Amino acid sequence: MYLTKEMMTSAIKNIQNFNDDITKLYNSHGMSLSENIGRRNCMLSQAQEHFIAEELRNAFASVITDGAPGKPDIFIEDIHTELECKLTTRNVSGGINLQIDYETLKQKGSLDCMYLVASKDFNSFSALLFKGLTIE
């Protein structure tokens, strides 16, 4: 497995620190980032990609983070592996949205996908890595 529990633990700590920093910035301007969990998760998705890629760079020589449309969030050149990253939180009814772009998945055939499920208060996490996810 190319992504370890220790790597994810470190990445999550860095994502939490980044969240603390932008939360303070929002608060200093009279806004609350925690009022809209969807917005918070959207803002932190690039941080998720960045900090996971940083951890992967400790194990691999060439790790690219792009995330632009049509590009993988993370590409590990050493092992020719694409990793899509998704940050989500339980919705009001308790469900967890684990969605991915169907057309991308269909076109690629299979894809590795890291879902980071964060609690509303951003203090508890579950990391779910789907290796070789297909449309089936």
Image (tube, rainbow, N blue to C red):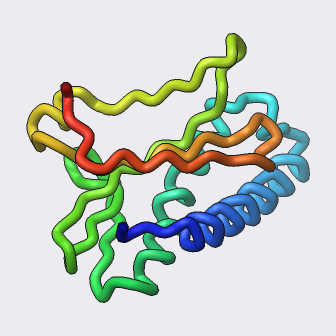
- Residue found at x 68% / y 47%: 125
Tell me residue 104's x, y (percent).
19, 36
Above or below for 117 versus 135: below
Tell me residue 6's x, y (percent).
59, 72
Number of on-image labels: 0
- Residue found at x 80% / y 58%: 20
User: Which quarter of the picture shows residue 11?
Assistant: bottom right
Say which of 9 and 33 sits in front: 9
Tell me residue 134's x, y (percent).
20, 35
On the picture, is 116 further left or further right than 14?
left
Given the current orientation, which residue lies at the most extreme front position? 1
Say which of 125 and 63 sits in front: 125
Above or below for 131 versus 3: above
User: Which quarter of the picture shows residue 30?
Assistant: top right
Quadrant for the N terminus, please. Answer: bottom left
Say which of 49 and 80 sits in front: 80
Quadrant for the C terminus, please. Answer: top left
Given the current orientation, which residue lies at the most extreme top position? 93
On the picture, is 77 further left or further right than 57?
left
On the picture, is 31 further left or further right than 108?
right
User: Which quarter of the picture shows residue 64?
Assistant: bottom left
Tell me residue 111's x, y (percent).
23, 47
- Residue found at x 36% / y 45%: 130
